[in-house]
Image (cartoon, rainbow, N blue to C red):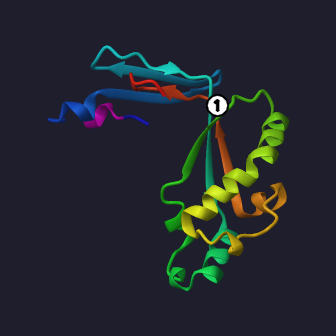
């Protein structure tokens, strides 16, 4: 991602407050931050978990809410939910954590679209969760704000 081209002629300083360029090398990603202010970005001790719905979620929504027939998967995933989660050393460690928290994430996703819990799937374990949702785990999370979390 390179915003510096857009910022060279920009009139709005807010648009140019951060210039980020990232490129992949054999040694891994390189990220350069150029700031117009004094704030220094710092990596926080959390990972970001982005959860997006799969088609079975949309199919369920269409069965419980007749007014949702025009809602598509792309509509539901337009702005996915992001969770700050602990950093994980291995995929197995993440999967153990996900098994413990999938019901909570599942319930949050269902409740965002349909609040009648009687219509929710009764077994919201890891197997159904993985059929209905896709998870993207990102280990590098930077805080670019000076306000505490």
Residue placed furthest toward the left: 11
Q: Residue at x 66, y 77 (%)?
A: 59
Q: Quadrant of residue 146?
A: top left
Q: Nearer the viewer, residue 149 or 132?
A: 149
Indicate whether residue 44 is drawn in magenta: no
According to the image, label 1 marks what residue? 139
Relative to 95, is 111 above or below? below
Question: Is the residue marked by circle 1 packed among few (<14), some (14-19), or many (20+) residues within 10 Å?
Answer: some
Relative to 109, is 2 above or below? above
Q: Residue at x 45, y 24 (%)?
A: 148
Relative to 23, is 109 above or below? below
Q: Nearer the viewer, residue 116 or 92?
A: 116
Magenta part, dominant SS: helix
Q: Residue at x 49, y 24 (%)?
A: 31
Report the magenta residues as a range: 3-7
Q: Position of residue 43 (x, y in %)?
A: 54, 21
């Amino acid at each position: 991602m390179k915003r510096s081209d857009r910022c060279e002629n920009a009139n709005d300083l807010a648009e140019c407050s951060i210039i980020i360029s990232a490129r992949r090398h054999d040694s891994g990603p390189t990220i350069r931050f150029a700031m117009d202010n004094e704030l220094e970005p710092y990596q926080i001790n959390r990972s970001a978990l982005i959860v997006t719905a799969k088609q079975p979620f949309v199919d369920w929504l269409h069965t419980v809410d007749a007014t949702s027939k025009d809602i598509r998967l792309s509509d539901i995933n337009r702005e996915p939910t992001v969770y700050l989660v602990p950093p994980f050393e291995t995929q197995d460690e993440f999967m153990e954590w996900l098994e413990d928290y999938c019901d909570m994430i599942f319930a949050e996703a269902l409740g965002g679209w349909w609040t009648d819990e009687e219509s929710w799937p009764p077994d919201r374990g890891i197997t159904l969760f993985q059929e209905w949702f896709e998870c993207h785990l990102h280990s590098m999370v930077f805080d670019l704000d000076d306000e505490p979390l």
